[in-house]
Image: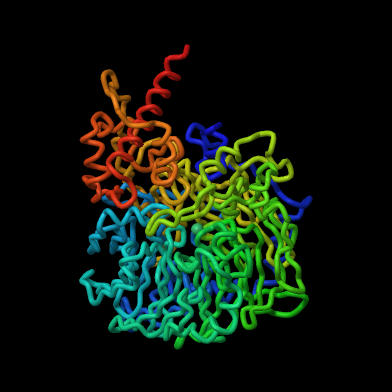
Amino acid sequence: MTNSGAELVVGGGGSASVKENYDRLVVGPGSESAGFWEINMKRIGMVLAVALAFSLAGNGRPVASPGEVNGVRLQSAEMDGEWLSVGQGYSEQRSSPLKMIDTGNVGQLSLAWSYQFDTDRGQEATPVEIDGTLYTSTAWSKVFAFDATTGALKWSYDPKVDGAKGFDACCDVVNRGVAVWKGRVFVGALDGRLIALDAKTGRVAWSVQTTDTSRPYSITGAPRVVKGKVLIGNSGAEYGVRGYISAYNAANGRLVWRFYTTPNPEGKPDGAASDAVLASKAAPTWFDGEWKRSGGGGTVWDGMAYDPELDIAYFGVGNGGPHNYLLRSGGKGDNLFLSSILALKPDTGEYVWHYQTTPGDAWDYTATQPLMLANLNLDGKPRKVLMQAPKNGFFYVIDRATGKLISAKPIVPINWATSVDMATGRPIENPKARYYRASAGEPPFLQSPGPAGVHNWHPMAYNAETGLVYIPAQVGWFAFIPEAKFTYRPGAWNMGLDYPAGMAASGNRSLMPREIGMPANQLVAWDPVTQTARWRLTQPLGPSAGVLTTAGRLVFQGSDDGDLSAYDAADGRKLWTTPTGNGVIAAPMTYAINGQQYVAVLVGAGGGGQMVSVGRQKVRLPGRLLVFKLGGTARLPKLDIPEPAAPLDLNGVVSGGDSARGRALFQVNCYMCHGLAASGPWVANIKRSPMLLTEDAWRSVVIDGALSSRGMASLSRYLSPRDAEDVRAYVLSLERAEAARGKVP
Ligand code: CA
């Protein structure tokens, strides 16, 4: 097994690789600057309108009741330069009309203030700013409120999520943000609670459990508020849950409606908004299989948007559970509404339309990625569209009134499908992508993309002036290999695929798909009208990072390296960069107070697919909020960077466990967090932990849950003490092998 090759594929980035700057590829000779100005001239009227709207806001636009966010204000946020919701406003374009910071002066951007959080886990949230207060969530679903000018902490709130709940989080104990409405701040907690806080004090106004706590549900996504209803989904498809969206009354936390994304496995109605459409459209697309035990997946864990004119709310639906479609549904049926975009009426949850990006998902190709609404001029006609770059690699432009596909093109090279059939809206699949053919003796197919997808949750941004969508994308592949013997284990990782074998095969150079190119990260500047790239920046594969664009003709993006950079939105030229001291995966946002524009970003490596990489520093560091302005004079407090754990003295350390058996158990129970060869510093490096030294110490953690408050739950549901000792024997053998390799001259 070539570990480094395998690690590349899952987005780990190769812990040894030092990142280089993005290489700029301008696509199409001379197209970039001409295209920009041409489009800019066409939109000049709108640009002026935005500038005017902002100058009013910037000069103290009267605010009747500070902190009061309502539908009218949310509707105009994107024009007013306010950032009132994680995606900025209802359209989720992440495109600010603010332009005090622009291509000419961005070089003078420097730190205005910063704040250090009390956790070193991944930071994925985008803050919001309302009337001088900046609100954000952090890992472990904590919430903080700051004076947005000075950085003074106003209050913080800790929902005190049980650390053992970390076991149910596939992709770190992250949280992607809060929602604000009528003097309250809403956060979805990792343990499935939806909590309303007083925006002034942080005191709990109400709290409801949105999930069945006997199932491995979690929440990492940001709520949105539409017409007084808090919309919230959940996660857990890899473990075995049935996805749904709920709407709660913002005033009192009462459930208003719920919409399930998969049929009730017991074949009966739920008494929910989804009953009729599940019976008529979805149920006929499911066949006998493991979904009846797992719930089928289809969690709604990230993308949402709302069109106030059409009065339609949009939701992105995740992948199937188990991933293995043969096991899940006998290899038959589209399995609606997995990997779909759902359009619902926000008052009732009534179904309006759906578009399924990946029928019969078998590859973790979620369509829960960020959804974005825009008005595009297509064939001379203005069209109200919804845009998404889901994991499967296509960029979709859809009529958001009807759900009809307008266009779809791959944004990077992929090989699982050649194109999307415009008549049916279905992908034209490569037959090899149905991986179970590999079990019939064919060599594994290195499929692009792998389960990490071409684009995941990392926010993209649309700049109407350049006409481009800036997408944090990745190129990679993976060998999907069915698990030889699948047993459904309640609450555990239930994929039906042999991910360790897949990762090993993915590093096989003789199988590498030449047409895909080397695994890489890309920042793609995509023209949604022509469905072509205007420019791309590429760098070696690593964790991706979210994007912000502004009317200052800028694109901001952080990196796993720990840099935050600004690029010219027209051509991708790098104009400014600053080290943040930690890996960045979250998206920056921007706001203005008294004529001064600020750019804020959470820094903190972590999140899904980062088991082998925490950026350049190789150790986990506390997350921080960094806020920049032109001519800022704040200094970033220095961090004491801990040395990576030293090798243990293993002389005389023995285990009676069976290392080979321990390896198999490790690959079913442990690798998701600790890395394939226990290499992940994302969580503790267990090869260097003193608990490895004795059977008792190991058992106290693995079986008795001594470290459950830090996210290492007791595995006694899945492992006997003897199993645990076998795993210890395996981890000891890994560390000894590593030490032996180190001694080779
Ligand atoms: Ca997934």
Query: Is 476 placed above or below 197 here?
Result: above
> Is any atom of residue 265 visible in this view?
yes
Which residue is depicted at the point 26% across and 54% down? 163
On the image, the x and y values in percent for residue 544 come to: 52, 50
Q: Is residue 683 rendered to the left or right of residue 300?
A: left
> Is any atom of residue 95 visible in this view?
no
- Using the rendered view, name the quadrant where residue 182 is placed: bottom left
Query: Is 204 placed above or below 151 here?
Result: below
Which residue is depicted at the point 58% across and 54% down? 453
- Using the rendered view, name the quadrant where residue 131 is placed: bottom left
Of residues 416 and 223, the one drawn nearer to the viewer in this rendering: 416
- Using the rendered view, name the quadrant where residue 680 is placed: top left
Q: Is residue 575 rendered to the left or right of residue 663?
A: right
Of residues 48 and 337, the one drawn nearer to the viewer in this rendering: 337
On the image, the x and y values in percent for residue 475 come to: 62, 47
Of residues 166 and 389, the one drawn nearer to the viewer in this rendering: 166
Q: Is residue 509 rendered to the left or right of residue 221?
A: right
Q: Quadrant of the N terminus?
A: top right
| Scheme of colours in the image | rainbow
